[in-house]
Amino acid sequence: EDCSLFAFDQDEDALENELDDDRLTLIHANFSLMEKSLKMYQGVPVDAVLADLGVSGHQFDEGSRGFSIRMDEELDMRMGRGIKMTAKCLLEVKEKEEIIQFLKSNSDIRRVGVVADAIKYHQGEGRMNTTGDLVNAVKKFAERGKENSFLAQVFQAIRMEVNDEVNVLKEMLEQSAQVLKPGGRLVVISYHSIEDRLVKNFMKSGNFEGNVET
């Protein structure tokens, strides 16, 4: 009865689901601002931190957000509208080599060079405005029978770059050590190997390379 729960979500739509409970403080911010926000609300130290990474079901189902391969909507992919650059803008300003780099870093797909070529070609032709345009540009590079998995990986890589998800995750993990009580618990729900590796390395060694200091 005397506990407090501080929840973070940068998505404006999430604010509509706020529970009517005095124990809950819903903070409209990215969890990379966890330490600063908790200090502002006098919530430090905490007993536990639970981080649920990735995209919500609502964001996938709301076609206008541009997260889903199933719909032909604006190429957005921003977790919150406070983020300045949409996926469409990102693909316009990034050079081919930069696209190759974040496709490699944020996914497990092969032939990232030809994928990046196709994206820049379609973008140059004015045909990279919607999620459908992106699907049409790259789907021919998928293995037969694995089209949806391949497309999901491409979308994931672009979404992670738009939202700077790797750096945001690193910031949250580092701050967790500052806000947790001694003996507190850190729990992270991750959905792919890139996030999983960072979290496991940090929990094991306190750094993101997994180097245990002796």
Image: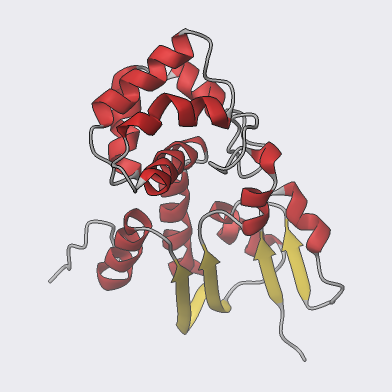
Residue 122 place in picture, x, y as percent:
44, 15
Which residue is farthest right? 20
Residue displayed at 82% across by 71% down: 19
Comparing 94 with 37, the one in front is 94
When the figure is inspected, residue 198 is found, relative to residue 19, above or below; the finding is above
Residue 137 place in picture, x, y as percent:
43, 24
Residue displayed at 35% across by 43% down: 106
Describe the colour scheme in one phrase: secondary structure
Q: Is residue 205 visible?
A: yes
Residue displayed at 43% across by 69% down: 177
Locate the N terminus and report the quarter of the image it occupies.
bottom right
Q: Is residue 81 visible?
A: no
Relative side of 45 to 200, left or right: right
Locate the C terminus and report the quarter of the image it occupies.
bottom left
Residue 85 place in picture, x, y as percent:
57, 28
Residue 74 place in picture, x, y as percent:
64, 29
When the figure is inspected, residue 189 is found, relative to residue 126, above or below; the finding is below
Query: Tag count in the figure?
Result: 0
Which residue is farthest bottom? 1
When the figure is inspected, residue 61 is found, relative to residue 81, above or below; the finding is below
Residue displayed at 46% across by 75% down: 186
Comparing 100 with 123, the one in front is 123
